[in-house]
Image (cartoon, grey):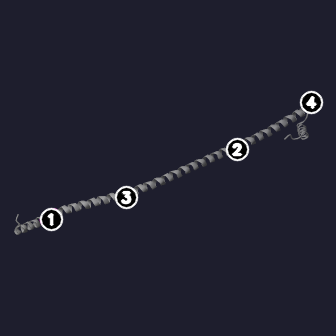
Amino acid sequence: MSFNLSDMLFAIINFAAMAFILNKVLFKPVLKVLDDRQNMINAVHRQAQEAKQEAEADREQYSLEMKKLRIQTQEIMERALKAGEESKNIIIADAKANAESMMQRTREELELEKEKAKKELRSEVAELAVLAAGKLVQQTLRAEDHEKLIEEFIHEVGDPT
């Protein structure tokens, strides 16, 4: 193996030309494609991270909204229960007031009937007493005398009320 300087120089120039051509034609475009691909991967990764963060924020927002809805639902249920209880109390109070009113009217009617019955009874007793007294005395009384005897009888016997 002999070492020839011209062959060596030719090999170096040939290698340099080949390296220059490969660098221009192959290496730079391949590096550009690799850089573009790396940039695209980084962009997709960034988008994925942003989407993940956005999804986390949406999940937290959804969780907060669900809590708010649960609280609102609970408040609505409590208001409905309270309104139902108030309605029940109002209905019961109205029913009691109506019952009390009816009882009072019934008492008043009974009292009126009682008074009416007492008056009728007094009148009948007085008439019977006058008739009995008339038979005893064997005389016929005039209407004025009759009324006078009834009044005296009631006065003597007294008001039974």
From this viewpoint, which residue is outermost toward the right? 137
Mark 3 vs mark 4: in front:
3
Residue 94: x and y in percent read: 65, 46
10 Å crowding of disc 4: few (<14), some (14-19), many (20+): few
Of pointers 1 and 3, the one earlier in the residue sequence:
1
Of pointers 4 and 1, the one earlier in the residue sequence:
1
Mark 2 vs mark 1: in front:
1
**Quarter containing the N terminus:** bottom left
Q: Residue at x 34, y 58 (%)?
A: 49
10 Å crowding of disc 3: few (<14), some (14-19), many (20+): few
What mark, if any, has residue 100 been given in the picture?
2
Mark 3 residue type:
Gln
Asked whether 131 or 31 is in front, the reply is 31
Does residue 98 show up magenta in the picture? no
Q: Secondary structure at mark 2?
A: helix
Image side of residue 63 versus residue 122, left or right: left
Q: CA distance from mark 3 to mark 2?
A: 69 Å
Give the residue number, with chain letter if any, for mark 1.
Answer: 23
Find out whether the residues at labels 4 and 1 contact each other: C-beta distance under 8 Å.
no
Give the residue number, with chain letter if any, for mark 3.
Answer: 53
